[in-house]
Image (tube, rainbow, N blue to C red):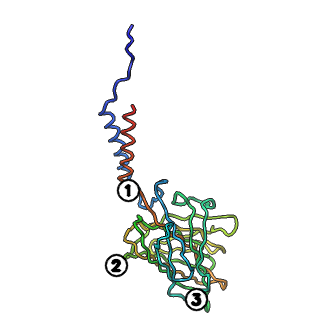
């Protein structure tokens, strides 16, 4: 009777290499099919929502979470009135999104614009000089348009040379805390890069999401126009987030390390 222990045969290094090759190829094959708009790559991705700094009177600065100035905001081309408090901060909690949003954490700080008409006219432009501060792109979240007034909001991105930076539309999502929600359908025209309410129902629209992937983005211009503005005033809600995405090479390296480690444990 032999006392020699029975051990499994050693792992074939060629088998482990083949498995690693197949895994890496599978990842590489999927990468080209992933649109640039898919920014929710898991907890490793980060969105730094900008907030108003100091006085909420145009022009003023927007800062990131570290308190660094990342954008300057100014109202121009105004046909109407900009009363005190026309631009204020608001907070959207992740728990109140009715539909999915393209971020890992849907909680964000945003700006609420509410201006008054003058002689039955309300039209204004919002110009934001953006510094991406090393981020991979800008996530823009906008909503709160009133369908009954025929309000529209055009969005234009520009680089330092004044050339247009075209955003990618990620879809729309409703937000409902129980009262005062943003629920009405919102449509996006890629040809004119304009948001507007899909119907004429009273109340505010859901939020549309845009992704500016270009690191050359230097300015975002928003043009608001209302056909039949409300005497009490109207506007929109805007969220701006700097997005940092892990390098694809880092993800592949982590995958390779995990596969090699798994092979060694065998």
Residue at the far right: name it.
179
Picture coordinates of residue 261, whole percent (x, y): 38, 38
In this rendering, which labeled residue sits more in front, label 1 or label 2?
1
Residue 160's quadrant in the figure? bottom left
Q: Is residue 2 above or below residue 168?
A: above
Picture coordinates of residue 228, whole percent (x, y): 61, 84
Q: Residues within 10 Å of mark 2 (few under 14, many from 20)?
A: few
Which badge, 1 or 2, comes first in the chain's sequence? Answer: 2
Q: Residues within 10 Å of mark 3 (few under 14, many from 20)?
A: some
The tag on residue 247 is: 1
The tag on residue 80 is: 3
* Residue at x 35% of width, y 53% of height: 249
Pointer 2 with pointer 3, Cβ within 8 A: no
Question: Label 2, on which residue?
Answer: 161
Picture coordinates of residue 236, whole percent (x, y): 58, 76
* Residue at x 46% of width, y 71% of height: 190
Q: Secondary structure at mark 1?
A: loop
Picture coordinates of residue 202, whole percent (x, y): 66, 75
Residue at the far bottom: name it.
119
Q: CA distance from mark 2 to mark 3?
A: 31 Å
Which badge, 1 or 3, comes first in the chain's sequence? Answer: 3
* Residue at x 38% of width, y 23% of height: 8
Q: Secondary structure at mark 2?
A: loop
Quadrant the N terminus occupies = top left
Which badge, 2 or 3, comes first in the chain's sequence? Answer: 3
Q: Is residue 31 above or below residue 213?
A: above
Residue 161's quadrant in the figure? bottom left
In this rendering, which labeled residue sits more in front, label 1 or label 3?
1
Q: Is residue 144 left or right of residue 14?
A: right
Pointer 1 with pointer 2, Cβ within 8 A: no
**Total marks in image:** 3
């Amino acid at each position: 009777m032999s006392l020699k222990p029975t051990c499994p045969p050693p792992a074939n290094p060629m088998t482990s290499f083949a498995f690693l090759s197949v895994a890496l190829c599978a990842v590489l094959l999927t990468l080209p099919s992933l649109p640039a708009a898919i920014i929710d790559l898991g907890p490793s991705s980060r969105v730094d929502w900008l907030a108003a700094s100091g006085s909420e009177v145009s022009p003023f600065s927007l800062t990131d979470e570290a308190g660094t100035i990342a954008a300057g905001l100014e109202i121009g081309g105004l046909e109407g009135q900009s009363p005190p408090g026309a631009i204020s901060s608001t907070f959207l909690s992740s728990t109140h999104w009715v539909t999915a949003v393209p971020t890992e954490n849907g909680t964000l700080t945003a700006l609420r614009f509410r201006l008054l008409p003058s002689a039955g006219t309300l039209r204004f432009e919002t110009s934001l000089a953006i510094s991406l501060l090393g981020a991979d792109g800008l996530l823009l979240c906008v909503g709160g348009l009133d369908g009954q007034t025929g309000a529209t909001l055009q969005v234009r991105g520009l680089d330092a040379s004044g050339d247009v930076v075209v955003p990618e539309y990620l879809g729309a999502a409703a937000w409902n805390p129980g009262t005062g929600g943003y629920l009405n359908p919102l449509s996006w025209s890629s040809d004119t890069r304009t948001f507007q309410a899909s119907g004429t129902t009273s109340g505010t629209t859901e939020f549309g999401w845009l992704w500016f992937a270009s690191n050359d983005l230097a300015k975002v211009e928003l043009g608001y126009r209302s056909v039949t503005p409300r005497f009490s005033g109207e506007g929109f809600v805007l969220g701006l987030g700097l997005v940092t995405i892990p390098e694809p090479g880092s993800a592949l390296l982590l995958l390779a390390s995990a596969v090699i480690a798994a092979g060694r444990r065998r």
